Image (cartoon, grey):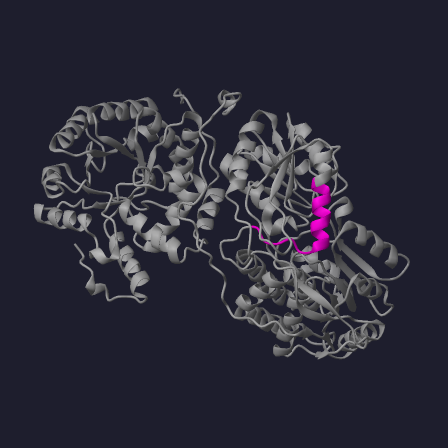
C-alpha cells in the first residue's frame, strides 16, 4: 500500500505551530441583550410561572450565571396544554394549509433577519463556537422552516391517497446541544402538518427558544400554536405524562428515552425518539488521507463532541494506522480552543459542569483501562467548563470508551484488517445513528454502506445535514425520522 | 502507468479539499495579526510583468516599486522578487543592483512549454547567464496528460541542471491539469525531479491559482518534508488580487505546514495587481481610514 515504505521509519522532522502570524482576538461584537429573566410562553404571551420560581442559567464559558429562567409547575403545564388544545381545535388545526405555510415562511424570514443576534445568544448560552452557531445552526434553523413551509399545502403529495390529517397536541422535549436547531426540527414539521406544540427546551439552554417565541409573536402566529415551558427534567417528565398530549417527540439520551417509552406505553400517545449514538468512522487504506483527517476531526470535535451522530469511534485499517494517527495528532495541535465568541475558535466550552464531569470520568476510565491518551496541548481558559480535545489509541471494543456515549471531544481509535472486520466492529454497539466511510473506491462505499446498521451514512464526508434528508437511528438510537417526507410521517395520521 | 515515485501520493477528494480550503476563508485576522500578515505578503510577492509589450521602461518602474512599495513611514518591506521574460532579465538585474531583491525569469518556452527540450534548456541557460537567480519553468502538460511521466520528470531534472545555482520553480498550469489528483501527483514528481519551488500557474490560463489547488501543493511539500527533512517552497500565481485573499493563503499555509513556511524563502505570490490592494490595506491600518486609490503609484 501507499504508506508501507514509511512504516517503521522514524521521521524526526516535525512541524511548528506556534507564534508566527498569531491571530489576534477577534470577538463577535454584534450587540445582544440577555433579559434579566425569561418567562414561560403560553397562549401567545410571556407569563410568569405560577410556581413563582426561577432557576439560574449559566454561561458555560465563564461558569457564571447570566440570566434566570422560569420554572414551570403543574398549573403552568395545564395552561400550556389547554392553550395548545384550543389552538388545535379553533385556529391552527382548522386553518387552510396554504395559510399555515405563510406563517412558516414568515417565521423563516424573520429567523434569517435575526440570525446574527440569535447566533450570539446561542453561543453565550450553550458554549458552542460562534463560527458554528453562525454558519451551521442558524442557516439550518431557517432552512427547516422554509422547507416545511413548502410542505404545508402539499401533504397530499407526500402521502398519496392517505388523506393525511394532523395528530393533535404534541409534546416536544429537546436537548442542549443544538437548542434552536432541535426546536426547529421539532416545531416546523409539527406546525406544517397542522399540529400544535408544547415545547420543553433543555434546562441549560432555554434562552434561544424563548427568543424564537418572540419571533412567533412577531409573525402573528395564532396564540397556543406553540407554547414553551421551561424547567428541569421533572418538567419534561410531567409534560410527557400529561393526559392532554397526543404525541411525544423526544431528542436526548437513550437513558431518558427508555424512561419516556415506558411512560407512554399503554397510552394512545404516539412516540418518536432520537437518542444517543456511538458512530464509527471507517477509514480504509486507500482513503484520501488529508480529507479523511478533516472528516474525523469534524466528526468528533464539532460542537465539542456534543453531537448524537458524532463519529466517536475511529476504525482505521491497520496498514495506515500509524500514518493516520500521526496526521491526526498534527491536526489536533492546530485546533483553537477557547472563547466561543471569538470568530477563530474551533472548540468552545463544555455545555455544563455536570457534562464536564461525565466526560472527565470517561476519559479517566480510558486511561485506567490501558488506552493511550493523545491530548491537544492548548491552554484552557481559567474559568468556565473546558475539555482539551483528545483521542485514545490502543482502544479495544471492550473498553468503556468504545461502548458508552461520551458526548464530548473524545475519540476512540481502533483498527481493522478487512472490510468484513470493519463492518463487524462498526456494528458492535447498541447504537445505530450514523456512520462514515472513507475510501477512494466507489464500489466499496455502496457495499459497506448496505451492511452498516446505522440510520445515516456519510461517504467521504461527515456531519452533512439538509431538511430534505431524513435523520434517525437504528437500535437504541431511537425510532422515527426527522426531515424529509419520512419526518412528516411522524406528525400526520390517515384522515 | 509505469512510473513510480519514491514517495507515492494518496488520493485527493475534490469535495473535501475544497471544503477545507473554504474553511480558511472563515479565519478572522485583526490588528497586529493583520498588520504582520500584510507586510509578510508584500515580502513574498514576486512582482510580475509578462506581456509582449514589456519594455525596459516598464521593468524599471516595476523594479523601483519592488525596492520600496510604499513611503518609508509605513514600514513596508521590499517585494520578494521581480519576475520578467528572459529578454528583460539583464535590465532588471541592473535596476535592482544592491537591493538584494532577486530577479526571476520565466523560461523553457513559457507559457506553453511546447518547444524542443534543447531550446528550453538554452532558454534557461540564457536567463541564468543574464543574471536571473530564480527560474520559473513550465512543465510539459501535454506529456503529463499523455501519461509520459518519465519525460516530464527528466525534463525537470535537465532544467534543474541547467539552472546551476539558480533556484528552480516548476509551473504546473493546474488549470490545464484540472484534477487535484493530477496536482498532487505532479507536485510529488516535480519535487523528486529537483524543484526548489512548485508553482500553480503561468497566469495565462484560467483558472489560475485557487486556494484549494494551493492547499494540495502545500500538503505535498509538508508530507515530503516530514518524510525527508527537506523543505520545498510553494508559489500560487495568477488571479490573487486582494489583500483579503492573500491573507487567506497565509492562514492556510500557517495551519497546514506550520510557522516554518511563513517566509519568502518558502512561500511566494505571483501577482501583478495584488500589491496595490495590500498597500491600501496597510495604509488603512496605519491611518485608521481608507485612502484614495489615487494616492498610490500604480507602476
Camera-side residue: A117 or A106? A117
Task: Please identify the quarter of the rendering in which residue A100 is found.
Answer: bottom right
Kindly identify the residue that appears in the image at 71 percent across and 40 percent down.
A364
Kindly identify the residue that appears in the image at 51 percent across and 58 percent down.
A342
Give the answer, above or below, for where A206 lies relative to A301.
Answer: below
Question: Horizontally, is A115 left or right of B146 in the view?
Answer: right
Overall secondary structure of the magenta stretch? helix
> Can you see residue A471?
yes
Say how many tags the image has.
0
Question: Horizontally, is B221 left or right of A260 in the view?
Answer: left
In the rendered structure, which segment of residues is drawn in magenta? A347-363
Q: Position of residue B62 (x, y in %)?
A: 16, 49
Camera-side residue: B100 or B12? B100
Give the answer, above or below, for where A27 lies relative to B136.
Answer: below
Residue lying farthest to the right in this orientation: A266
> Can you see residue B179?
no
Q: Position of residue A402 (x, y in %)?
A: 71, 37
* Quadrant in which the C terminus of chain A appears: bottom right
Q: Position of residue A235 (x, y in %)?
A: 81, 65
Kindly identify the residue that appears in the image at 22 percent across and 38 percent down.
B111
Task: Please identify the quarter of the rendering in which residue A273 is found.
Answer: bottom right
Residue A362: say if magenta: yes
Q: Position of residue A219 (x, y in %)?
A: 61, 77
Residue A104: say if magenta: no
Amino acid at each position: 500500500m501507499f504508506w508501507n515504505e514509511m512504516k517503521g521509519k522514524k521521521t524526526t522532522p516535525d512541524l511548528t505551530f506556534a507564534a508566527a502570524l498569531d491571530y489576534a482576538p477577534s470577538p463577535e461584537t454584534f450587540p445582544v441583550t440577555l433579559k434579566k429573566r425569561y418567562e414561560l410562553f403560553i397562549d401567545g404571551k410571556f407569563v410568569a410561572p405560577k410556581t413563582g420560581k426561577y432557576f439560574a442559567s449559566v454561561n458555560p464559558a465563564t461558569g457564571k450565571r447570566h440570566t434566570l429562567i422560569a420554572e414551570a409547575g403543574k398549573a403552568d403545564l395545564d395552561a400550556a396544554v389547554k392553550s395548545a388544545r384550543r389552538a388545535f381545535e379553533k385556529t391552527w388545526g382548522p386553518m387552510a394549509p396554504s395559510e399555515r405555510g405563510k406563517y412558516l415562511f414568515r417565521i423563516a424570514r424573520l429567523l434569517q433577519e435575526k440570525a446574527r443576534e440569535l447566533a450570539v445568544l446561542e453561543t453565550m448560552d450553550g458554549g458552542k463556537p460562534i463560527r458554528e452557531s453562525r454558519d451551521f445552526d442558524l442557516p439550518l434553523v431557517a432552512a427547516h422552516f422554509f422547507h416545511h413551509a413548502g410542505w404545508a399545502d402539499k401533504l397530499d403529495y407526500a402521502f398519496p391517497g392517505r388523506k393525511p390529517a394532523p395528530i393533535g397536541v404534541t409534546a416536544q422535549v429537546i436537548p442542549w446541544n443544538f437548542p434552536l436547531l432541535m426546536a426547529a426540527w421539532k416545531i416546523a414539521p409539527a406546525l406544517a402538518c397542522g399540529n400544535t406544540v408544547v415545547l420543553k427546551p433543555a434546562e441549560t439552554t432555554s434562552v434561544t427558544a424563548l427568543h424564537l417565541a418572540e419571533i412567533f409573536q412577531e409573525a402573528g402566529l395564532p396564540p397556543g400554536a406553540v407554547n414553551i415551558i421551561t424547567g428541569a427534567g421533572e418538567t419534561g417528565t410531567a409534560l410527557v405524562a400529561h393526559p392532554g398530549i397526543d404525541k411525544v417527540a423526544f431528542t436526548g439520551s437513550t437513558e431518558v428515552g427508555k424512561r419516556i417509552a415506558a411512560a407512554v406505553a399503554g397510552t394512545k400517545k404516539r412516540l418518536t425518539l432520537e437518542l444517543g449514538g456511538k458512530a464509527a468512522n471507517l477509514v480504509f487504506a486507500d482513503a484520501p488521507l488529508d480529507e479523511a483527517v478533516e472528516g474525523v476531526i469534524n466528526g468528533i470535535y464539532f460542537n465539542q463532541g456534543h453531537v448524537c451522530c458524532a463519529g466517536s469511534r475511529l476504525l482505521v485499517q491497520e496498514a495506515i494506522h500509524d500514518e493516520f494517527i500521526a496526521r491526526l495528532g498534527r491536526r489536533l495541535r492546530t485546533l483553537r480552543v477557547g472563547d466561543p465568541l471569538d470568530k477563530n475558535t474551533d472548540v468552545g466550552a463544555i455545555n455544563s459542569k455536570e457534562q464536564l464531569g461525565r466526560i472527565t470520568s470517561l476519559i479517566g476510565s480510558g486511561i485506567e483501562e490501558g488506552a493511550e491518551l493523545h491530548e491537544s496541548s492548548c491552554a484552557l481558559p481559567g474559568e468556565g467548563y473546558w475539555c482539551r480535545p483528545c483521542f485514545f489509541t490502543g482502544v479495544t471494543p471492550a473498553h468503556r470508551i468504545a461502548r458508552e456515549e461520551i458526548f464530548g471531544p473524545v475519540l476512540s481509535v481502533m483498527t481493522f484488517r478487512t472490510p468484513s472486520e470493519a463492518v463487524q466492529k462498526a456494528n458492535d454497539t447498541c447504537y445505530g445513528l450514523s456512520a462514515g466511510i472513507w475510501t477512494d473506491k466507489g464500489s466499496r462505499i455502496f457495499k459497506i454502506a448496505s451492511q452498516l446498521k446505522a440510520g445515516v451514512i456519510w461517504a467521504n464526508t461527515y456531519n452533512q445535514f439538509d431538511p430534505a434528508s431524513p435523520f434517525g437511528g437504528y437500535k437504541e438510537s431511537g425510532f422515527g425520522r426527522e426531515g424529509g417526507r419520512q419526518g412528516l410521517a411522524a406528525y400526520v395520521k390517515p384522515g | 502507468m509505469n512510473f513510480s515515485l519514491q514517495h507515492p501520493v494518496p488520493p485527493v477528494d475534490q469535495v473535501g479539499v475544497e471544503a477545507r480550503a473554504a474553511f480558511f476563508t472563515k479565519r478572522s485576522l485583526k490588528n497586529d495579526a493583520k498588520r504582520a500578515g500584510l507586510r509578510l505578503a508584500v515580502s513574498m510577492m514576486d512582482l510580475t510583468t509578462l506581456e509582449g509589450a514589456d519594455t525596459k521602461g516598464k521593468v524599471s518602474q516595476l523594479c523601483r516599486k519592488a525596492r520600496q512599495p510604499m513611503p518609508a513611514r509605513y514600514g513596508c518591506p521590499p517585494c520578494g522578487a521581480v519576475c520578467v521574460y528572459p529578454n528583460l532579465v539583464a535590465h532588471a538585474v541592473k535596476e535592482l543592483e544592491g537591493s538584494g531583491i532577486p530577479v526571476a525569469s520565466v523560461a523553457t518556452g513559457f507559457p506553453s512549454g511546447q518547444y524542443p527540450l534543447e531550446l528550453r534548456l538554452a532558454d534557461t541557460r540564457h536567463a541564468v547567464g543574464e543574471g536571473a537567480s530564480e527560474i520559473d519553468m513550465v512543465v510539459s502538460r501535454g506529456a503529463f496528460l499523455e501519461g509520459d511521466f518519465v519525460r516530464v520528470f527528466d525534463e525537470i531534472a535537465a532544467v534543474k541542471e541547467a539552472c546551476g545555482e539558480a533556484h528552480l520553480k516548476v509551473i504546473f498550469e493546474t488549470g490545464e491539469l484540472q484534477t487535484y489528483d493530477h496536482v498532487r501527483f505532479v507536485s510529488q514528481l516535480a519535487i523528486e525531479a529537483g524543484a526548489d519551488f512548485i508553482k500553480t500557474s503561468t497566469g495565462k490560463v484560467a483558472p489560475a491559482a485557487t486556494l484549494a489547488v494551493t492547499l494540495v501543493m502545500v500538503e505535498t511539500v509538508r508530507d515530503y518534508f516530514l518524510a525527508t527533512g527537506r523543505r520545498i517552497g510553494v508559489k500560487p500565481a495568477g488571479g490573487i488580487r486582494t489583500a483579503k485573499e492573500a491573507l487567506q493563503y497565509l492562514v492556510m499555509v500557517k495551519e497546514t505546514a506550520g510557522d516554518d513556511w511563513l517566509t519568502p524563502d518558502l512561500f511566494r505570490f505571483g501577482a501583478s495587481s495584488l500589491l496595490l490592494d495590500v498597500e491600501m490595506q496597510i495604509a488603512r491600518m496605519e491611518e485608521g481610514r481608507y485612502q484614495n486609490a489615487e494616492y498610490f503609484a500604480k507602476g
